[in-house]
Image (spheres, rainbow, N blue to C red):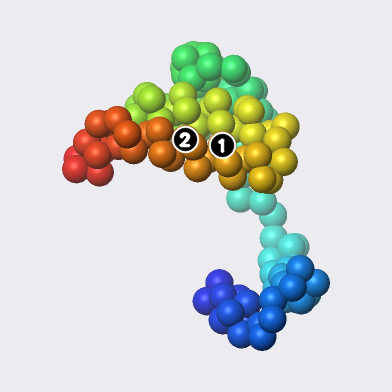
Amino acid sequence: MLAMLEEDLLALKSPSKENIASVLENYHTESKIDRDKSFILEEHMDKINSCFSANTVEEIIENLQQDGSSFALEQLKVINKMSPTSLKITLRQLMEGSSKTLQEVLTMEYRLSQACMRGHDFHEGVRA
């Protein structure tokens, strides 16, 4: 479906805000096919909200450990495989991005990507 969307956007003769919005709206309408399906994480939302509502990665890990459910322990396994630096950057990005405009978020993400690529961690992560 994304390939078709890309084709339709590229096929616009003189793209304008209005006709781009029209193409996107058509695909948005079509994407409502799955609207009656339940959210896959619905049964875990209470745990997600309580465990991941902390302001630091360390607090999130502590919450997951204290919860001790199979869901929480599975999340701990995933988190423990991740780069601690990336986890902290992502958490901060999510917290700050929630109150920014799209333009501000895109600027922030661009700057973060450039800053991460300056260090050795990114290249080591790709290598590994």
Q: In which quarter of the image is the C terminus?
A: top left
| Above or below, comparing residue 23 to residue 67 in the picture | below
- Residue at x-position 55% and y-position 25%: 92
With respect to residue 103, does 71 lie above or below?
above
Q: Mark 2 points at which residue?
A: 112
Q: Can residue 77 be seen in this view?
A: no
In percent of the image, x 56 and y 75: which residue is there?
6
Q: Work out how far the residue at label 2 is from the one at label 1, CA to CA, in angstroms.
A: 6 Å
Which one is in front, 118 or 123? 118
Residue drawn at (43%, 40%) of the image: 113
Q: What residue type is labelled 2?
A: Leu
The answer to which of 90 and 58 lies nearer the viewer is 90
Which residue, given by chain and number where applicable, does mark 1 sit on? 108
Q: Is mark 2 on a helix, strand or loop?
A: helix
Q: Position of residue 18 (x, y in %)?
A: 80, 72
Instruction: Measuring from the top left, give residue 26's x and y in whole percent.
Output: 75, 76
- Asked where in the image residue 16 lies, by quadrant, the reply is bottom right
Tally of numbered tags = 2
Residue 49 placed where, x, y %? 66, 28
Whether residue 47 is situated above or below residue 35 in the rendered picture: above
Image check: 75 left or right of 95?
left
Relative to residue 120, is residue 84 drawn left or right?
right
Q: In which quarter of the image is residue 103?
A: top right
Residue 123 visible in rendering: yes
Q: Pinpoint residue 66: horizontal percent, then vertical percent.
A: 51, 14
Q: Is mark 1 on a helix, strand or loop?
A: helix
Q: Which amino acid does label 1 sit on?
A: Met
Determine the residue positioned at 65% across, 39% down.
Answer: 104
Mark sitting on residue 14:
none
Q: Mark 2 and mark 1 in contact? Answer it, CB < 8 Å.
A: yes
